[in-house]
Each structure stands twice: as structure tokens, then as C-alpha cells.
């Protein structure tokens, strides 16, 4: 067993798994409102020219550090109201103010625009005195891929590494083939046939089997500690496992949490809806809070 890889399987019964799927469907038709204790006031005036929103919970300040949040959406979509709620939940769990990065989107701005924006926002935090060790990078889906890509560029440039990164359901190999319906991942919330158009639009001619766009192909030595989370029913499950094994073999500390029975980006059911009746999914928040407290 690789000592740098800590693998945890988190079980769920069928009732809970179905509840997460139902809740995720409601998020887009009836999204909740932002909590009353959330502050949208900017706490840092300069973010490298990258637009976005500061969201804080419980009076967090820059002295607590910063969580840099990179949203998902297939590299091409954004949902600001939901992202603000996600940012607020992340601020509660990580104990830091959150900057939700409004990175440039494909197809108007394909690779490497989004990665450049994430990296610019990170460097702006460093330039204004936020200690690297008190910065966390968190992202889901395409945003999780961008987080891992940004870490590779941080390492290549010799910049200080953040204290940790939390990629949820990342795509780490854009050259990978994904199972057809009925061949695995049949319970996932994303259609495998959509993966190629998404990656083709994002890459706009760049090679899918090279880093940093496909983090799996990069030099994975010396990266920030990772808390990787993935659903057991995801078509990306094997991809995430491959990355976790490669990164940990290269010496990067990796905690890999596999949430059995859960679909792609399942954590949205908790971070946005915060449904107390979904105990297995709620585990994500408690594990994130405990992990963030150590990084």
C-alpha cells in the first residue's frame, strides 16, 4: 500500500443515494437562497484582475486564510447564484473567506484562459500577503480539473504551494475514453457521450494527452496535499483513482474519499441544499472541515 495514499470508502444505502439525486435535480429548478449570515462584501480589493465574488460566513477574515473556489460547468457554464451558496458553505466548512473565481469560459475563451485566471487569482493573494499555507484551492468537476492544472503551473514556476487542494469529481485525463451507457457509470448524473464535445470545445486544438490541461500527464511531485472526492457511480471513478495513485506514488499526500452510490459532483446536494436528511452526503462537509483544519 502506498503510504502517501489514504483511501476511504464511505457507504450509502439506496435510499440515501436516491435522495441525493432527487435533491440535485431540485437545485436547478428551485435553488435555495443565500443564508442571512453570509457576507458578500469584498475583503480583498485586488484579485489579479480576475472577476469573482468574496463570500464569507461567521465573520471570517483574511487572518483566517482564504479558500479559492473554482466552479464546475464543463469549462463553459456558470451559475453565479448557486456558486455564491456553494462558496458560503465552503467558508463555513473551511473556516476562511472564499473567493469564487469567475474565470473565462469556453468556447469564447478556451484553454489556457481559465487556468491562467485561477493562477492569477492565487498569485494575487500571495502578493497581498496571504500566506500560501493558509490558502486552500477547492473545485468541482471542470473546476476541480482547473485546480489540479493550476497546481502544476505553481510547481513549474517555483511559486509557493497552497496549504492544500480539494478537487471533487475532477477530469484528470482529457484523452480518456469513458464508458458507454450500460457499461459502467449507468447511475451517473452525466452522460458519457457529452464528455468528448466538452473537452474538444475546451481544448480548441490543444492536445488532450498533455499537462497542464490533463493533470494526469504532469509532474506530480511536490504538489500540495490533496483531498480528492468522487462518487462511486461516477464515470470518472477510474480516472480519479488513476490520478490518486499516480500523485501519491510521486510523493504527494493524497486522501481519496469514494462516496459509494453517489453521482458526479454529488456534494452539491449538501453544499447548496444542506439537506440534513442525507447523512452520507453530509459526511462530505464534516470530512472537509476536519481536513481543512489540518491544512
Image: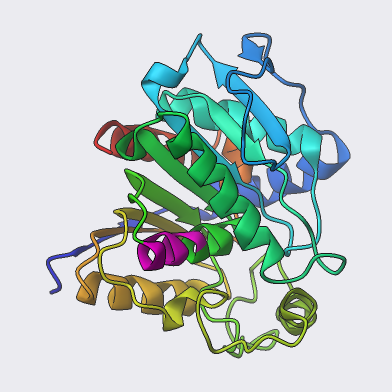
Q: Which residue is depicted at the point 64% across and 69% down?
A: 187
Q: Position of residue 1 (x, y in %)?
A: 13, 74
Query: Which image quarter holds the C terminus?
Result: top left
Residue 121 on image: x %, y %: 58, 43
Quarter of the figure with residue 77: bottom right
Is residue 276 something one can see in this rendering? no
The answer to which quarter of the image holds residue 233 is: bottom right
- What residue is at 87 percent from the left and 66 percent from the top? 108
Residue 87 is drawn in which quadrant? Answer: top right
In the rendered view, does 123 fall on the left or right side of 88? left
Is residue 204 rendered to the left or right of residue 240?
A: right
Q: Is residue 257 magenta?
A: no
Most frequent secondary structure within the magenta stretch: helix
Q: Would you place residue 120 above or below residue 249 in this image?
A: above
Range of residues picked out in magenta:
150-157
Residue 103 vertical placement versus 250 (above, below): above
Residue 152 placement (x, y as % from top left): 42, 67
Amino acid at each position: 500500500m502506498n503510504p502517501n495514499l489514504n483511501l476511504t470508502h464511505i457507504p450509502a444505502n439506496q435510499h440515501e443515494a436516491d435522495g441525493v439525486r432527487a435533491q440535485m435535480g431540485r437545485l436547478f429548478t428551485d435553488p435555495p437562497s443565500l443564508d442571512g449570515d453570509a457576507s458578500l462584501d469584498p475583503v480583498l480589493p485586488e484579485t489579479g484582475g480576475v472577476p469573482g465574488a468574496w463570500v464569507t460566513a461567521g465573520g471570517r477574515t483574511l487572518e483566517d486564510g482564504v479558500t479559492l473556489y473554482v466552479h464546475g460547468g464543463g469549462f463553459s457554464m456558470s451559475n453565479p447564484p448557486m456558486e455564491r451558496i456553494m462558496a458560503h458553505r465552503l467558508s463555513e466548512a473551511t473556516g476562511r473567506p472564499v473567493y469564487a473565481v469567475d474565470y473565462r469560459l469556453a468556447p469564447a475563451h478556451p484553454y489556457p484562459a481559465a487556468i491562467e485566471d485561477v493562477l492569477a487569482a492565487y498569485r494575487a493573494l500571495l502578493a497581498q500577503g496571504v500566506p500560501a499555507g493558509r490558502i486552500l484551492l477547492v473545485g468541482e468537476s471542470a473546476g476541480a480539473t482547473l485546480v489540479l492544472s493550476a497546481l502544476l503551473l505553481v510547481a513549474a514556476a517555483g511559486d509557493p504551494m497552497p496549504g492544500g487542494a480539494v478537487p471533487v469529481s475532477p477530469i484528470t485525463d482529457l484523452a480518456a475514453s469513458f464508458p458507454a451507457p450500460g457499461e459502467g457509470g449507468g447511475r451517473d448524473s452525466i452522460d458519457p457521450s457529452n464528455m468528448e464535445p466538452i473537452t474538444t470545445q475546451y481544448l480548441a486544438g490543444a492536445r488532450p494527452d498533455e499537462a497542464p490541461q490533463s493533470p494526469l500527464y504532469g509532474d506530480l511531485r511536490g504538489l500540495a496535499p490533496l483531498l480528492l472526492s468522487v462518487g462511486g457511480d461516477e464515470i470518472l471513478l477510474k480516472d480519479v483513482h488513476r490520478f490518486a495513485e499516480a500523485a501519491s506514488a510521486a510523493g504527494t499526500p493524497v486522501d481519496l474519499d469514494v462516496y459509494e452510490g453517489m453521482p458526479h459532483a454529488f456534494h452539491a446536494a449538501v453544499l447548496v441544499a444542506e439537506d440534513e436528511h442525507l447523512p452520507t452526503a453530509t459526511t462530505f462537509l464534516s470530512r472537509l472541515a476536519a481536513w481543512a483544519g489540518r491544512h
